[in-house]
Image (tube, rainbow, N blue to C red):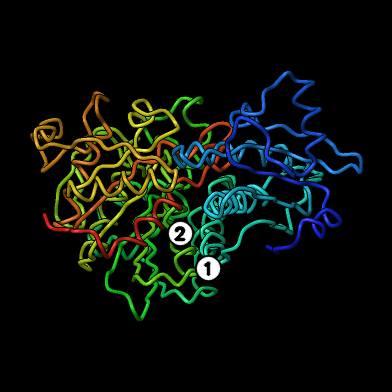
Amino acid sequence: MLAQLTFSQTLHATTHLLVLFPKTRTLPKDLPQDELLNAVLKRRKMKADELAKSPVAANAANGMLVAWAMLDIDKVVFAQQVQVRKALQLLLDEHPRKLSIVVLGNEKQRQCAAELAVYGAWVNGALLPVHKKRDERKPLQKIMLIGSADKTPFDALHAQASGNLLCRELTALPPNELTPGIYRKRVQKLARGNGWQHEEFDVKELRKMGAGAFVAVAQGSDPEDAAIVHLSYQHPDARQTVALVGKGICFDTGGHNLKPSRYMHNMHEDMNGSAVALGILLAATQNKLAVNLDCWLALAQNHISPKAYKQNDIVKALNGTTIEIIHTDAEGRMVLADTLTLAARAKPDLMIDFATLTGSMATALGSRYSGVLGNRDELVQRAVNVSKQCGERLCAFPMDEDYEAGLESKVADIKQCAQVGDADHILATRFLKRFVDDVPWLHIDLSSSRCEEGLGIVASDVTGFGVGWGLGMLSGSYSISLSK
């Protein structure tokens, strides 16, 4: 709940107060709890403008915890998000039920600070699931805002927060609580609740269809509960249709090329791409975004078993391409191949896939950026520009034709991957390109799906990266030139 109150009303109704004000050399006049802040700065031997780097907090005489931070709106959005997140965490670490936010400055400065702080409170004040005998955490229930005039953006921000939280909740669930079968039931419930059209292609049907790439991965699981799930959102005023495709490997052992323990840990999060796609779909629906969305989720597990696919197998994908299996831990591109084929058959105006696809992307970028590649240069550039505007940062990579030599096979149309891991993020995208036809397409390799101690505005390790960026792309998708 978001309420806009006067400062005097707020002081009587809150135990936790955040004060955001523009960067300046000296403290502004009439700053809430200014005497207390001056005492804190004196004790810490800090200058006032150091609040632009390090927010501080202290308890007022009435017991209220107050946090102060300077916000420089001339900095990039990501830096602003980090500063607000740091200030918020000084308060949210106590899991308050109510939070008050005071924003100061001119109208532009107040509005910017208000939007960042309210969104940050929404995404960080909710609780991700934990499994402890006693969970004494309490979710944030009410936000009281002072100083912002324009209420219009908050509905869209609340929708985005809902999408981010759905993505993070699903990603954080342990693998025994989110098998493909359980995931499918959860998606069915979401579809009913949000009015989405829903259809499923289970393993039996996919075999009949000839989706051999997906089935190769799914056949190692017992029960065979994998499926490609298709969801649709329609808007009467839409001028474009966008397909969202998500990798949903609910647990990845690596298959016969078994991962060592260190790299198998957290592999229940290998379904994050599907959660990002779902989060975007939910937020777009709640925000009544004027675009048609087709959401395709490739839900499966990569297990080791007598039925599991293996090195040197040759399988035929849904579009007829034969694939030589090189490494069973390159399963993501396999399930995406047939899912992208299905999505491309509908001829959307734009197709975006999301996947925690390659370790080489994480090696290249770490966990603070994700990578983007695509088959239209202007589309890739648009993706990078949107990432700067929303604070979910993307780095573009090449995928020139000469990389294709690494996937040449003597016994099939294409190798699944190369035996050496060099530039695997580029080779994986070259592989996926075989299955998108000529549809304008972006591939997002989610190396920042998990970032220890948070990223940007999000404080948890699981970041929900991609939901905000996806909404930014959809909001401006009608203006993108998609010519080849």
- State yes or no: discs 1 and 2 in contact (Cβ < 8 Å): yes
The answer to which quarter of the image holds residue 308 is top left
The residue closer to the viewer here, 343 or 56, is 56
The answer to which quarter of the image holds residue 457 is top right
Left or right of 345, for residue 393: right
Can residue 318 be seen?
Answer: yes
Q: Which residue is mark 2?
A: 278
Left or right of 284, for residue 38: right
Q: Quadrant of the N terminus?
A: bottom right
Q: CA distance from mark 1 to mark 2?
A: 9 Å
Residue in the image at 71% along x and 45% along y: 18
Amino acid on which the number 1 mark rests in the picture: Leu
Residue furthest to the bottom: 236
Asked which secondary structure carries label 1, the reply is: helix
66 vs 226: above or below = above
Numbered mark located on residue 190 in the image? 1
443 vs 207: above or below = above
111 vs 424: above or below = below
Can residue 460 be seen?
Answer: no
Sequence-first disc among 1 and 2: 1
The residue closer to the viewer here, 89 or 25, is 25
Residue furthest to the top: 45
Q: Quadrant of the C terminus?
A: bottom left
Amino acid on which the number 2 mark rests in the picture: Leu
Residue in the image at 74% along x and 52% along y: 100
